[in-house]
Image: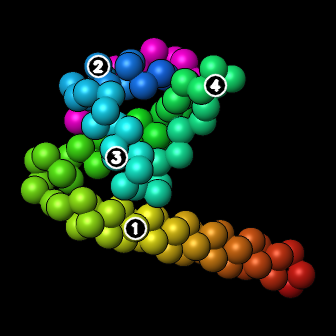
Amino acid sequence: MSIPVADKPYLRIGEVARLLGTQTHVLRYWESEFPQLKPTRAASGQRLFRREDLETLILIKTLLQEQGYTIAGARRRLEELRQAAQAQDRRQHISQVKDELKDILKLLD
């Protein structure tokens, strides 16, 4: 799902609801059910969502409404995806360190 977003660092809950085609109470409920969602708050108490939060909300909506996951199942799937991304980051970091060590060895020869 591709949603055009203005280059704003934060979006208010109403803007996010319009972009996702859902209601604000649904977003507040998802916030209570998914620990991955942690919008910041303005001084007025208004929820402010970052682009990263919007991407998570798009994934949650896809899992729940298009793929038929339950809330608990979607929560587990999000955690699985987070762990897989972390593992991929670790693999890339290890590969980068190995390459740097090989370069150092070449310099020492």
Marks 3 and 4, Cα distance to the nearest angstrom? 19 Å
Examine the structure image and report whether residue 23 is included in the region drawn in magenta: no
Q: Is residue 50 left or right of residue 19?
A: right
Choose top left, top right, bottom left or bottom right for residue 9: top right
Q: Could you tell me if the residues under marks 4 and 1 are in contact, i.e. CB atoms within 8 Å?
A: no
Relative to 108, is 71 above or below?
Answer: above
Marks 2 and 1, Cα distance to the nearest angstrom? 26 Å
Marks 4 and 1, Cα distance to the nearest angstrom? 28 Å
At label 4, the amino acid type is Ala
Structural crowding at the residue carrying mark 4, measured as other residues with C-alpha within 10 Å and reported as few (<14), some (14–19) or many (≥20) = few
Label 1 sits on residue:
79
Q: In the rendered structure, which segment of residues is drawn in magenta?
A: 1-10
**Residue nearest the observer in this picture, 84 or 18:** 18
Identify the element where label 4 is drawn. Answer: loop
Label 2 sits on residue:
18
- List x then y, in percent, for residue 92: 56, 69
Q: Which residue does the image show at 40% across and 55% down from the upper left?
A: 34
Q: Which residue does the image show at 59% across and 26% down from the upper left?
A: 45
Identify the element where label 3 is drawn. Answer: helix
Residue 30 bears which disc, if any?
3
Of callouts 4 and 1, which one flags the residue occurring earlier in the amino acid sequence? 4
Residue lying at the far top of the rendered structure: 6
Of callouts 3 and 2, which one flags the residue occurring earlier in the amino acid sequence? 2
Label 4 sits on residue:
42
At label 2, the amino acid type is Arg
Task: Select label 3 or label 2 by which is in front.
Answer: 3
Of callouts 3 and 4, which one flags the residue occurring earlier in the amino acid sequence? 3
Q: Which residue does the image show at 52% across and 68% down from the upper left?
A: 86
